[in-house]
């Protein structure tokens, strides 16, 4: 035989030399939950090993991440009070705004991204303003733009709208540009499916809707071509990075989007993926380390160049060990 593919699998040095998919710590983003209060490090029951932090405790985790080599975080705010207008999302003294003002100057080498949405802040738990029992798309755009601007004014390096309202990328881009923030990038949750994989996050952020569901604005998980329409629309509106969410069960979509857009593609390995791995490892039926490495590699292999994951710190450690990368 002339063709012997096994020749290039003979030892670990050779396998790494010819590896097609390569990863770097700089591509990892760690999602963090910040809440009101003081001296709080509160474990999330449905996400073992993940915590809600008060602003004063946030620096301790950021220092830990920096030591591991994870230098990008995504902040999610958990306010004490909610109302129908989600006013805590865009308040100058909102929880995310206070967190940013507290840590940005202290951690100049960290890159701070903020989730822009209304669901954590509205009393009804939906991602926008209501008109009866429906989310009013166009009325929500103004509040999303105000929220994004307030985050940037507080020190955010990038904003990431996750609400799935039509036209929100353009509304945010225009508002940032009008206020002199032309250089602030937008990472759009362009392809966000209405997924059951989000359940632990809703526990973590207290963002479950009080009635109905989000299927009228998040995508139907049966659809593929619609994902491309959403991604291409957001690029046209000014998105600098396109995100696919969730990751694990949607790697076909990651590849389709990667092949269709001319901007970087991110994938969010969501709370349900994390919780399943932790539960399986706790039950002794899977090897957590190996599963986490395989999940990450498959996401990059599909076309993602940015990986949002609650395992970011562990993956950085696995990279140091040479288990992945």
Image (cartoon, grey):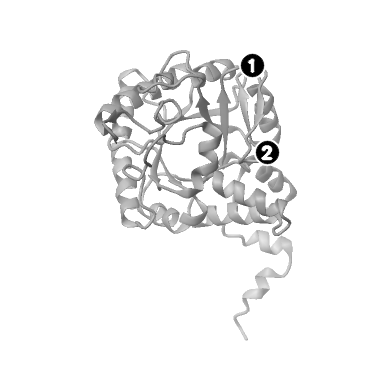
Residue 324: mark in rendering: none
Q: Secondary structure at mark 1?
A: loop
**Dot 2 or dot 1, earlier in sequence:** 1
* Frontmost residue, 250 versus 159: 250
Please identify the residue farthest to the bottom as the structure is shown.
1
Drawn side of residue 41 relative to residue 145, left or right: right
Q: Is residue 294 above or below residue 231?
A: below
Q: Is residue 112 above or below residue 8?
A: above
Q: Residue at x 67, y 59 (%)?
A: 16
Contact? badges 2 and 1 (CB < 8 Å): no
Spatial CA distance of label 2 from label 1 is 20 Å
Q: Secondary structure at mark 2?
A: loop
Residue at which label 1 appears: 38
Drawn side of residue 177 relative to residue 312, left or right: left
Q: Residue at x 50, y 48 (%)?
A: 197
Please identify the residue farthest to the front as the structure is shown.
211
Q: Is residue 172 above or below residue 285?
A: above
Residue 282: % across, % down: 72, 51
Q: Callout 1 environment at 10 Å: few (<14), some (14 to 19), or many (20+)?
A: few
Asked if residue 132 shows in the view, the reply is: yes
Residue 103: % across, % down: 59, 19
Drawn side of residue 202 relative to residue 228, left or right: right
Residue at which label 2 appears: 49
Residue 189, quarter of the rendered image: top left
Residue 255: % across, % down: 43, 56
* Frontmost residue, 31 versus 35: 35
Residue 104: % across, % down: 56, 19
* Frontmost residue, 123 versus 31: 123
Q: Residue at x 46, y 29 (%)?
A: 120
Please identify the residue farthest to the top as the structure is shown.
93
């Amino acid at each position: 035989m002339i063709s012997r593919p096994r020749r290039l699998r003979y030892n670990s040095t050779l396998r790494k030399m010819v590896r097609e998919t390569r990863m770097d710590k700089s591509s990892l983003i760690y999602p963090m939950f910040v809440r009101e209060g003081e001296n709080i490090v509160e474990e999330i029951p449905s996400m073992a090993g993940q915590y809600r932090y008060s602003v004063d405790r946030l620096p301790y985790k950021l220092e830990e991440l920096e030591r591991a080599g994870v230098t990008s975080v995504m902040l999610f705010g958990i306010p004490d009070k909610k109302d129908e207008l989600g006013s805590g999302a865009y308040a100058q003294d909102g929880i995310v705004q206070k967190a940013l003002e507290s840590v940005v100057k202290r951690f100049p080498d960290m890159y701070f991204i903020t989730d822009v949405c209304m669901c954590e802040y509205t009393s009804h738990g939906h991602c926008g303003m209501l008109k009866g029992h429906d989310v009013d798309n166009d009325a929500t755009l103004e509040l999303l733009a105000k929220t994004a601007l307030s985050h940037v004014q507080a020190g955010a390096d990038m904003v990431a709208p996750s609400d799935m309202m039509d036209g929100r990328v353009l509304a945010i881009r225009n508002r940032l540009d009008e206020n002199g923030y032309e250089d602030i990038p937008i990472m759009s949750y362009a392809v966000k499916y209405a997924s059951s994989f989000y359940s632990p996050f809703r526990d973590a952020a207290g963002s479950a809707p009080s009635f109905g569901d989000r299927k009228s604005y998040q995508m139907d998980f049966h659809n593929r071509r619609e994902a491309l329409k959403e991604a291409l629309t957001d690029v046209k509106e000014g998105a600098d990075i396109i995100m696919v969410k969730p990751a694990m069960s949607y790697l076909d979509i990651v590849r389709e989007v990667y092949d269709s857009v001319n901007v970087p593609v991110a994938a969010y390995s969501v709370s349900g993926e994390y919780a399943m791995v932790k539960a399986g490892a706790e039950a002794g039926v899977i090897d957590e380390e190996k599963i986490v490495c395989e999940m990450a590699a498959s996401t990059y292999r599909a076309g993602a160049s940015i990986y949002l994951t609650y395992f970011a710190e562990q993956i950085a450690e696995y990279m140091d060990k040479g288990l992945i990368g």
